[in-house]
Amino acid sequence: MSEEVKEIQEQETDLVLNEELDTKVTHTYDDSDIQVLDGLEAVRKRPGMYIASTSAKGLHHLVWELVDNGIDEAMAGYASTVTVTVDQNNIVTVEDDGRGMPTGMNEKTGKSTIETIYTVLHAGGKFGGGAYKVSGGLHGVGASVVNALSEWLEVSVFHDGSIFYIRFENGGHAVEPLKVIGKCDPAKHGSKVSFKADPTIFTETTVYDHETLRDRLRQLAFLNKGIRLVFNDEREEKEEKRHHEFMYEGGLKEYVKFLNKNRTAVHPEIIYSEGHDKGIQVEVACQYNDGFNPNVYTFCNNINTVEGGTHEEGFRMALNRIINKYARETNVLKDKDDNLTTDDCKEGITAIISVKHPDPQYEGQTKTKLGNSEVRKIVSDIFGTQLERFLMENPDQAKAIMEKAALASQARMAAKKARELTRRKSSLEISSLPGKLSDCSSKDASICEIYIVEGDSAGGSAKQGRDSHYQAILPLRGKILNVEKARQHRVFENAEIRSMITAFGCGFMDEIDVSKLRYNKIVIMTDADVDGSHIRILLLTFFYRYLRPVIEQGHIYIAQPPLYKAQKGNTVRYAYTEQQMERLREEMGDRLSVQRYKGLGEMNPEQLWETTMDPKNRTLIRVNIDDAEKADQYFSIMMGEEVEPRKNFIIEKAKFAELDI
Ligand code: 28F
């Protein structure tokens, strides 16, 4: 959960290098040295224009930029391995066994090509569609940006038995020109870059996250079959964590297997297709599991296109077309039956769609939606042909898939009835607001908050303690339904879920309209114990599956009730973590009376207001899903049938004490 839940303060925006900057690059390219350095200075002055942020996310982008360059060299067929090493001081080294960057001079700049690549924004034919670079859209900002944002950076190239070397310092100045510093085995070849992120720029942290690096390197290995990605984390004490190697000959086939490992597959083999057309490479893999939610991840040039786009549309078109065709041919659908919908065909599917495009166009709010229209048909043709072939050649597996889609269709029709009921109710406006809801008096959604509270007694305290002008309280009785294990119509029959949907007022699923949300903040307030965190996860699962845009747009929060109350004489203070309690003990000395809160119900209304609901004192954690794959894994593990992976997951995550899982 730690990846999904971030402090409110940490709001990050992904920024794509815009056209304007690209134009500027062309000008500076052959201009004088001073202007070249101006470019790097501009990066240092406004780093947010070139990388996502200067928080942890931006820090990691430095690594991805260099890794992308190594992967490009491997994809071009010259390198087999890209290695990332993080040392004790968080100095990162990225190395590949490719041809080695060109060691000659650049005519226009009068400097070596390497110095040019590392000091001129977007220099090098690799960028801007010139040569073979297909990766890097979101963070494809060029090696010079990494240099600009490093305290120092060193490049070594191994080529023809010589080691070429150059070092940059002070905002990207070469200390000396490129030179040969020694000999190496003539058989050795490749590029190696080490850098130290500049702490005056990355003021929040210059410490890399092991899991973030490991997971992305693994993902890159799935997305680029046959390339070996090695991760050495010299900061780790445990031997098994210090070294990771990822290489998947099966590519996306192995990615789907990996994602479905905690799920029960409906058919044994993974449906796989690949091909290319008009210079666009397409790879698709999918497999159905016995769950009800689809998990479809799409990529363009190794970037997760979170908002989908034309490659996903092509996939959906083919899935719908071929499954309906096969269902008709095998009489699963009779003449009188309607076609299966795309949602029917997608129920329980895990699918990865990856395209490599020489000139990708990104659209959407976060520029993570692929827009190139030719991609639609190309993906649809390549995947469609091979899906049809799979069904023909594997009649038993095809039968299992047809049954799954047919069941989904029946359930959809039942769900439609239940939803219409829910919807009719919610359209009756105020009179139909759930009886348990203590609404606020303001109708200005931008200031309104709704607290979803576990249990009637805590609900009572919250109701008395709140500021009823803008705070509404909705108490929940007992556990809410696990939507991960229930089909849609069961979900909409559930009383607690209906109450929430009616209270929120914004609809749900495909008919959601976040602008109709009646509250700007939806705050989950549960006990700080195991049951409380279970209820929280159930609620988040429901929001994730049925109200995802509400999460994406940042309306979901988790309240932080205190764990302890410490009192000495007239002084009362609260601690929200064990560490805070330790500190309080030190500050307040002995003869302290300490109360450990077991539940919200133990607090009187004033205390609950003061500690957890009053904007002046409270801490709210904004729920932020920035990685759908992780969230899916998380929910499927926490909510799924299999006990063993859940146990392991809890152990693995137990160190995040604040999560209290
Ligand atoms: C540490 C990360 O950056 N590897 C790289 C190459 C190889 C070439 C290259 C890179 C050519 C035209 C600029 C070699 N020989 N790993 C890396 N490996 N860049 S970066 O060329 C640079 C461009 O302008 C390379 C022949 N062609 C290309």
Image: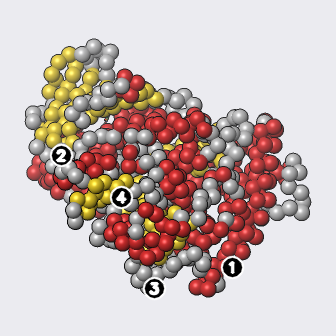
Cα separation, mark 3 vs mark 2, equals 48 Å
Q: Earlier in the sequence, mark 1 or mark 4?
A: 1
SS assignment at label 1: helix
Between tags 1 and 4, which lies in front?
4
Estimate how packed mark 2 is, as few (under 14), some (14 to 19) or many (20 or more) residues with alpha carbons within 10 Å.
Answer: some
Estimate how packed mark 3 is, as few (under 14), some (14 to 19) or many (20 or more) residues with alpha carbons within 10 Å.
Answer: few
For label 3, the residue is 441
Amino acid type assigned to the residue bearing label 3 in the image: Ser
Amino acid type assigned to the residue bearing label 1 in the image: Arg
At a point 36% along the width and 25% down the height, the residue shown is: 238
Q: Earlier in the sequence, mark 4 or mark 2?
A: 2
Q: Position of residue 55 (x, y in %)?
A: 28, 52
> Which residue is more in the foreground, 9 or 182?
9
Cα separation, mark 1 vs mark 2, equals 57 Å
For label 2, the residue is 199
Cα separation, mark 4 vs mark 2, equals 34 Å
Q: Earlier in the sequence, mark 3 or mark 4?
A: 3
Question: Which label is found at residue 655?
Answer: none
For label 4, the residue is 562
